[in-house]
Amino acid sequence: MEWNKMSKVLEGIRVLDFGRFIAGPFCAALLADYGADVIRIDRVGGSEDRFIVPVTDSGEGALFLQVNRNKRSITLDIDSAEGRDVVRRLVETADVVVANMPPRSLKSLGLDYETLCAIKPDIILTASTAFGSHEGAGHRVGFDGVGQALSGAVYMSGTPDSPTKAMVPVVDFSTALSCALGTVMALYERRVSGRGQCVEASLLRTALNLSSGALIEEATLAINRQATGNRSPSYGPSDIFRTSDGWIIAQAIGQPLFRRWCALVGKPDLADDPRFHDDLSRGSHGEYLSALMGEWCATRTRADALSQLEQARIPAAPVYSPREALDDPSIQASGAYVWTDYPGLPRKAPIVAPPAVLSRTPPEVERRPPTIGEHTDEVLAEVGYDRAQILALRQAGVV
């Protein structure tokens, strides 16, 4: 069937999700949002990433709910011989295997590309790691913060005396987005070649991409730039400012915006001051510009400051708490939140909708995240196990 005749872009594609935490599972969730049948392979009793930042009575975590929507779950002991047989049968029916673990772990579990390809030649393995699969790095483990730290991002955040990590897992989610793109490209290429391939990504490579501007600047100019808190060293004013009743961010980048900002704060002469003739010079004098903006903001409410900045067409926004981000009417109206029930939740959870929307074949969050092994019997029956065999697997602790 041609893709353009399908009701969803990835309809008919089956994905086995052995991913944990964010990079692997969110990649698989994105594929599910666009129609793929994604089967999460949980450990018997539930995998460890289920229970980080618990929000339900049974301990499921906030990020688990976000990155496992639209999936089915089976429990499986893949270390056992019987479990390996289940994996083999599942792979025979699959198009994609998603896993984020070191290469040696993949091989020991029989999830390396060579083993999978021997079972199904056109299989696509999407494998993300912390540092890559090359010699000397493939065995190492790491989380989002490790990638941030190694890339220079943490050094350039906060202050020289207090390097600061982003508390949201930007590297994990960005790696997942890259993996989803790579997977779709591999599926697209397979239509011509009929062959699978391995899609690789790493937290470190992702983090380096995010930090690339600072890396290129240092490599070419060797200026040893230091952290400046929330103030940009490359243009200005660009900072976070305190108003009389809260915080805002405002960013003037480029001469037209800077000229409008000068008029806004009552300093039109600064637009022609040689100290501020371009973005870099304004960044170099950013402390002075931020101080002027801080004085202007201090005498205004957050709403008043933002209203005037909007009228001047200067990019600005309130610094929201999570509660404020949830309650903002314009964010709600955008369809960003899909309010979803889950067993044991005190109230519905706002699953954030996929970041990319297609006009004709849009993604959908249709299925809540699965409970532990919720679809085990159903999936096993699909790959040929009868009721007695499934019962035997349960009694043996394999599922």
Image: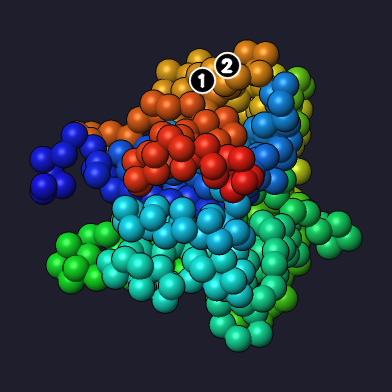
> Which residue in the rendered view is the most extreme toward the right?
161
Reply above or below: 66 against 177: above
The answer to the question of whether label 1 and label 2 lie on touching residues, with beta carbons closer than 8 A, is yes
Residue on which disc 1 sits: 340
The disc placed on residue 139 is none
Reply above or below: 237 against 7: below
The disc placed on residue 348 is 2
**Hey, which quadrant is residue 386 in on the image?**
top left
How far across and how far down the image is residue 39, in percent? 44, 43
Drawn side of residue 7 relative to residue 170, left or right: left
Q: Give the distance between the C-alpha atoms of the residues marked 1 and 2, in whole angstroms.
A: 5 Å
Residue type beneath disc 1:
Thr
Q: Can residue 237 be seen in this snapshot? A: no
Q: Residues within 10 Å of mark 1 (few under 14, many from 20)?
A: some
Q: Residues within 10 Å of mark 2 (few under 14, many from 20)?
A: few
Label 1 residue SS: strand
Question: Which quadrant holds the C terminus?
Answer: top right
How far across and how far down the image is residue 293, in percent? 69, 38
Residue type beneath disc 2:
Lys
> How many badges with numbers are in the image?
2
**Hey, which quadrant is residue 91 in on the image?**
bottom left
Label 2 residue SS: loop
Residue at 74% across / 53% down in the picture?
Answer: 165
Residue at 72% across / 76% down in the picture?
Answer: 224
**Hey, which quadrant is residue 308 in on the image?**
top right
Of labels 1 and 2, earlier in sequence is 1
